Image: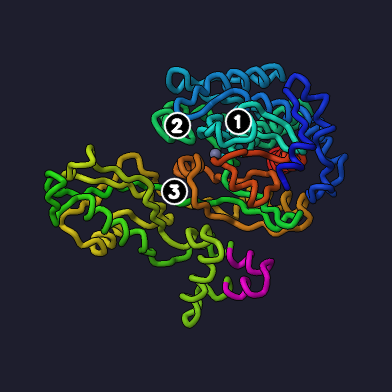
């Protein structure tokens, strides 16, 4: 039924015609349940100019950024970097393209508050230009067409992270056009290789160019404005993240002719080990951020779930509560313990040959503060098989200290978010996924994650999946919210 509706109403816009069909395609904010700002428009106009006009332009930027294919690997972010630099240059903001590796670049630009920069006060706006791959045959539209239909822009990167990139651009352009008097430098940074996290990632950028974007505060992807039933339920501001580590499980056995099965078959030993690991649940513990998250969420959840959230750390009902909460939402479960997901299996060369080795990969996400060694010693005891080894793979994530929930920037984000989303609670959030913010936090940056766009769970699931999309009303709202957050924190009062 939904398909029929989509086909009947299908309305596609190519970017050349974007400006013309933008209004026709976008549903009014109210119709999508997205609250419109109640803040006085005059104050906002003074600080950052006309945010509605900015949002209109940002729509075009988002569309064109989606059309620049930055699938990583190989990334090819240089094309997007040139596009972004062009927009900045046209606005009189001098961009610098930082070549990280051949074909892979980042862009940095700065609005100064005074002749001498104070990096400890500076605010960094971060977004990445690369996207994960798209399986074309599973999409209903061209993943790089930036097709507009039924009030949505479809395309790889529509959410992750080109929407944020366009919103960051709008914020710095808005400040520049309004000739805002800043109380701190505002730095724009478009990164590459976030999805790969390899040689061209922010780690390298920091190592080579830290002086160009050193800051005390940052806003990046990672947290969400959660919509449910047409209403913003709460705003989750990422202040910490779990740490990704890959571990290989290697089983060894005697290779031989498959007509004579052996007890030490590596495939069998690997399978047994994976079954044990797959059923293992690491012990629960609560970081301060997760504790505050559940406290806040309990207050707006239905009675039953709220009750279990409040019982998570009680001695008598805690264990049961943890089970109920984890079963209700697997992401909640992953927020309170180290998680282990077997993701790859590899064994055998011929149907009739018993291989001498079988391997699997576990993608492990550690709670901040936990160590891989402690978890692996538990897993070794569990597997208890001399034929099976666990090997930590290189390039694991690094644990970073959480960002403070007492900083002025966290307060500014909370204030604007509460105003813009009709008093919805603002909760600190520890994401199960990794972002560039961990690297920034390791360099003493108070980095916070917030996609400012109201998004439903259903749309969020399309991120890294098929038919990724963003509602245009939500995008416009997010552009305004981000511009206001930046203005609240960086414009002199
Ligand atoms: Zn991302």
Q: Secondary structure at mark 1?
A: loop
**Quadrant of res 49:** top right
Residue at horizontal 62%, vertical 22%? 84
Rate crowding at label 3 as few (under 14), some (14 to 19) or many (20 or more) other CA atoms within 10 Å. Answer: many
Asked whether disc 2 touches disc 1, contact meaning CB atoms under 8 Å apart, the reply is no
Residue at horizontal 67%, vertical 74%? 303
Q: Secondary structure at mark 2?
A: loop
- Residue sitting nearer the eye, 471 or 318: 471
- Residue sitting nearer the eye, 125 or 19: 19
**Foreground disc of the pair 2, 3:** 2
Asked whether disc 2 touches disc 3, contact meaning CB atoms under 8 Å apart, the reply is no
Q: Which residues are magenta?
A: 294-308
Residue at horizontal 30%, vertical 56%? 274
Q: Residue 364: image x %, image y %?
A: 38, 51
If you read the primary sequence from the N terminus, does the residue marked by circle 2 or circle 3 appear first? Answer: 2
Number of numbered callouts drawn? 3
Mark 2–mark 1 distance (CA, rounded to whole Å):
24 Å
Mark 1–mark 3 distance (CA, rounded to whole Å):
34 Å
Q: Examine the structure image and report whether residue 378 is included in the region drawn in magenta.
A: no
| Residue wearing tag 3 | 400
Tell me if 84 is positioned left or right of 264 in this view. Answer: right
Q: Disc number at residue 363?
A: none
Magenta-colored segment: predominant secondary structure: helix
| Residue wearing tag 1 | 143
Q: Residue 202: image x %, image y %?
A: 46, 33
| Residue wearing tag 2 | 201
Above or below: residue 149 compared with residue 263? above
**Quadrant of res 282:** bottom left
Q: Residue 152: image x %, image y %?
A: 72, 37
Q: Residue 128: image x %, image y %?
A: 55, 33
């Amino acid at each position: 039924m939904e398909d029929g509706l989509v086909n009947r109403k299908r309305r596609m816009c190519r970017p050349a015609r974007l400006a013309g069909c933008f209004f026709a395609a976008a549903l009014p904010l109210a119709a999508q349940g997205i609250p419109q700002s109640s803040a006085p428009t005059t104050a906002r106009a003074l600080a950052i100019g006309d945010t509605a006009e900015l949002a209109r332009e940002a729509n075009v930027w988002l569309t064109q950024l989606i059309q620049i294919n930055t699938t990583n690997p190989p990334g090819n972010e240089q094309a997007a970097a040139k596009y972004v630099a062009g927009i900045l240059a046209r606005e009189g903001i001098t961009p610098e393209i930082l070549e990280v590796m051949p074909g892979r670049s980042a862009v940095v630009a700065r609005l100064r508050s005074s002749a001498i920069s104070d990096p400890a006060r500076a605010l960094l706006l971060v977004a990445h230009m690369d996207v994960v791959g798209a399986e074309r045959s599973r999409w209903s539209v061209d993943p790089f067409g930036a097709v507009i239909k039924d009030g949505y822009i479809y395309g790889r990167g529509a959410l992750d992270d080109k929407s944020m990139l366009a919103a960051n651009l709008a914020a710095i352009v808005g400040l520049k056009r309004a000739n805002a008097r800043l109380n701190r430098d505002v730095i724009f940074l478009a990164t590459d290789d976030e999805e790969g996290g390899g040689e061209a990632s922010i780690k390298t950028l920091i190592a080579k160019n830290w002086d160009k974007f050193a800051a005390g505060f940052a806003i990046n992807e990672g947290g969400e404005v959660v919509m449910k039933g047409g209403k913003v339920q709460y705003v989750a501001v990422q202040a910490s993240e779990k740490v990704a580590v890959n571990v290989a499980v290697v089983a060894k056995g005697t290779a031989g002719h498959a007509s004579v099965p052996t007890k030490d078959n590596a495939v069998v030993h690997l399978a047994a080990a994976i079954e044990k690991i797959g059923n293992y649940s690491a012990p629960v513990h609560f970081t301060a951020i997760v504790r505050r998250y559940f406290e806040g969420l309990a207050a707006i959840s239905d009675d039953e779930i709220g009750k279990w959230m409040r019982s998570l750390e009680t001695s008598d009902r805690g264990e049961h509560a943890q089970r109920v909460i984890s079963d209700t939402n697997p992401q909640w479960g992953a927020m309170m313990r180290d998680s282990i997901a077997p993701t790859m299996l590899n064994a055998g060369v011929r149907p009739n040959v018993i291989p001498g080795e079988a391997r699997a990969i576990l993608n492990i996400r550690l709670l901040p503060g936990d160590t891989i060694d402690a978890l692996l010693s538990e897993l070794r005891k569990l597997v208890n098989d001399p034929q099976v080894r666990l090997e930590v793979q290189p390039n694991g994530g690094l644990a970073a200290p959480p960002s403070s929930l007492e900083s002025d920037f966290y307060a500014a984000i909370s204030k604007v978010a509460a105003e813009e989303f009709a008093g919805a609670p603002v909760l600190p959030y520890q994401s199960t996924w990794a972002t560039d913010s961990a690297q920034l936090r390791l360099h003493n940056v108070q980095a916070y994650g917030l996609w400012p766009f109201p998004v439903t769970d259903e749309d969020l699931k399309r991120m890294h999946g098929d038919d990724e999309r963003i509602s245009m009303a939500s995008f416009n709202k997010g552009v305004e919210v981000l511009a206001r957050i930046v203005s609240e924190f960086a414009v002199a009062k």
